[in-house]
Amino acid sequence: MLPASTSSKHNEKQERQIQMAKRPNRFLSFLNSKKVVPYIFITPFILSFLLLTLYPTIKAIIMSFQSVLPGQITFIGLHNYSRVFNPTFYKALSNTSIYVFFTVVILVVMPIILSVLLDSKFVKFKTIFRASLFVPALASTIVAGMVFRLMFGETDTAAANQVLNWIGLSSVDWRYNAWSGMFLMVLLCSWKWMGVNILYFLAALQNVPQDLYEAADIDGATMMQKFRYVTLPFLKPITIFVTTISIINGFRMFEESFVFWEAGSPGNIGLTVVGYLYQQGIQQNDMGFGAAVGVILMLIIFLISFIQLILTGAFKKEGA
């Protein structure tokens, strides 16, 4: 049996241990506070932005003023930029601009029409249609491009030429004409991303108040008038978003061109700005010049997106 003094000390020690166990951990309390938790959640995104976006952008801007050779980096000022504006770059920029124009028109107008149809009560099996339209987005661009190359081959036995021959037209050398080459790139992009944009507009249509349609029915509005004055205004924010990402992705396009003309297209009919960057920076090992092309492309995308947002009223306040 322990002496009374020893037993008392033992009990005090146990009480202190219990109190220490009950005391909240300051570090955990700090992490769980309302002021800190939001920053913890966004930390991975901030880190990924800093490491994968901001840092490469700054490095590319610095590199655009340098001559980069193995083991030798030399600052050459604006020399790379003075070389950028040449006939090949203008050809690549022209091809890219045409590609952006057609893909933006197709990937904004068609998804609006198809999403309204899929959201209407006249279409049955909506889930099947939505799923089938989204499936192409899951396919690799390279794999889809190889399938397109087989379908649009130059021989008479290719699927596209068989259709043309069946309706009495001559076969087409799809990858060797400027118009057909652009058609292939636009078609591949539209086929792949149409379903994704339809889902954007379908989600936006769920926010259109049904009582507005009922009020329009009471006023005797036609379907076109309801679409013009009720549906389209509510789709404006998502239309601006889809247009913006379509412009950006259009100017960044590389895979659609590469899958059809890996080693270069005849007469540069399929050369894009990013393809020109890859050709000069990677294939020709002129990284400084490729970085200058990339910086110019970034400025073009920023300028066009900014103008588009101004023209569509994206910066205006609600009700202004």
Image: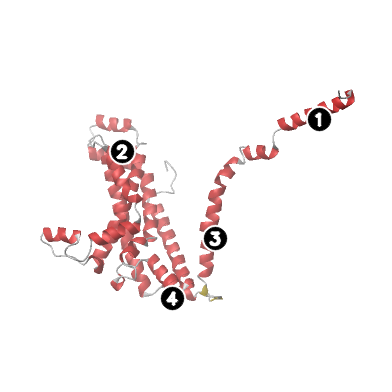
Mark 4 vs mark 2, CA separation in Å? 51 Å
- Res. 55 mark: 3
In terms of sequence position, does the residue under pointer 4 or pointer 2 come before the other? 4
Identify the residue under disc 4: 83
Q: Residue at horizontal 30%, vertical 54%?
A: 190
Numbered disc in front, either 3 or 4: 3
- Sequence-wise, which precedes: disc 1 or disc 2? 1
Whichever of labels 1 and 4 marks the residue nearer the N terminus, that label is 1
Q: Mark 1 points at which residue?
A: 13
- Tell me whether the residue at label 2 lies in contact with that at label 3, contact meaning CB atoms closer than 8 angstroms: no
Q: Which residue lies at the image location 47% right of the left edge and 68% below the top edge?
A: 291
> Between tags 2 and 3, which lies in front?
3
Earlier residue among tags 3 and 4: 3
Cα–Cα gap, marks 1 and 2: 74 Å
Q: In which quarter of the image is residue 261?
A: bottom left
Q: How far apart are marks 3 and 4 (CA)?
A: 25 Å
Residue 230 is tagged as: 2
